[in-house]
Image (cartoon, rainbow, N blue to C red):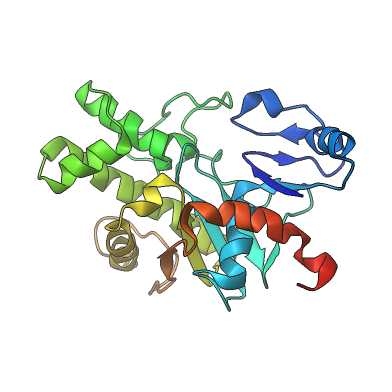
Amino acid sequence: MGIGLPGSPNPLTGLIRNSNAWWLNGQPLGRDLEAALGQPVRIANDGNCLAVSEAIDGAGAGAHIVHGIILGTGHGSGIAIDGKSHNGHQGLAGEIGHYSLPWPKEGEYPGPQCWCGRQGCLEMFCSGTGFELDYCMATGVERKAVEVIDLKRAGDPAAGATYRRYVDRLARSLALIIDIIDPDVFVLGGGMSNVDELYDDVPRLLRERTNLFAGNGKLVFSDSVETPIRKAKHGDSSGVRGAALLWRDTDGA
């Protein structure tokens, strides 16, 4: 059995940490499931599962380094190298949701309070939840992300402004990742990954803001940015596929 979940198991203790499904934190979920089921269990962050699934036969197939980005209830990610999950020494590789929004602008600092106890986490800006929060803070009206996107497409000014802020913030998030690991491809999953406009608007913004003298600030520390940004080929099923594929290295399948 393979399981993908928000957060991840500590490789030293097996206890779940960093999950916004907070009742899992501090619990030996893997050991408890193995005892209940009588069979071995592998657990990984849902972003890692997405990355593995898409690296093997999805939107990142054939790429050396695939960075899977979750744009859903939370904002996390996972890294697959040659089709295998890259967990890191602490098992934290790709934990992007809880560092600060890069290069904050006026009105973005210190940022909203995050469930993790910090303020201004990327999760509060680049998740679907953060998108809804931003619209609510600007208008005083609570709407689901899909409703805001529909309004934006219909020409609503407030919804359009929320979307433009979101694109800018997501571009900043991806720019920092490019500067650190420079993946071969980004693959987006989660509810906001279904906003088709992102796949034109985010790359365009990254390309436009490569000139130091453009007057609006450089993003990626380069004179060009051509990193593909693609929607997950397997959609909402990609995470569970990746969880099953955590066992791929044991049987050669």
Tell how many labels: 0
Position of residue 91 relative to residue 81, above or below, is above
On the image, the x and y values in percent for residue 133 come to: 34, 29
Q: Residue visible at 55% across and 68% down?
A: 183
Position of residue 223 relative to residue 116, above or below, is below
Q: Is residue 121 left or right of residue 163?
A: right
Which is nearer the eye, 44 or 90? 44
Residue 107 visible in the displayed image? no
Query: Most extreme residue toward the bottom, as rendered?
Result: 62
On the image, the x and y values in percent for residue 82 come to: 68, 73
On the image, the x and y values in percent for residue 4 come to: 66, 46
Residue 135 visible in the displayed image? yes
Q: Residue visible at 54% across and 68% down?
A: 182
Q: Is residue 199 left or right of residue 177?
A: left
Which is nearer the eye, 161 or 27? 27
Image quadrant where one finds the C terminus: bottom right
Q: Residue visible at 53% across and 71% down?
A: 60
* Residue 29 figure quarter: top right
Position of residue 85 relative to residue 1, above or below, is below
Q: Is residue 139 left or right of residue 5?
A: left
On the image, the x and y values in percent for residue 225 come to: 40, 71
Query: Most extreme residue toward the top, as rendered?
Result: 140
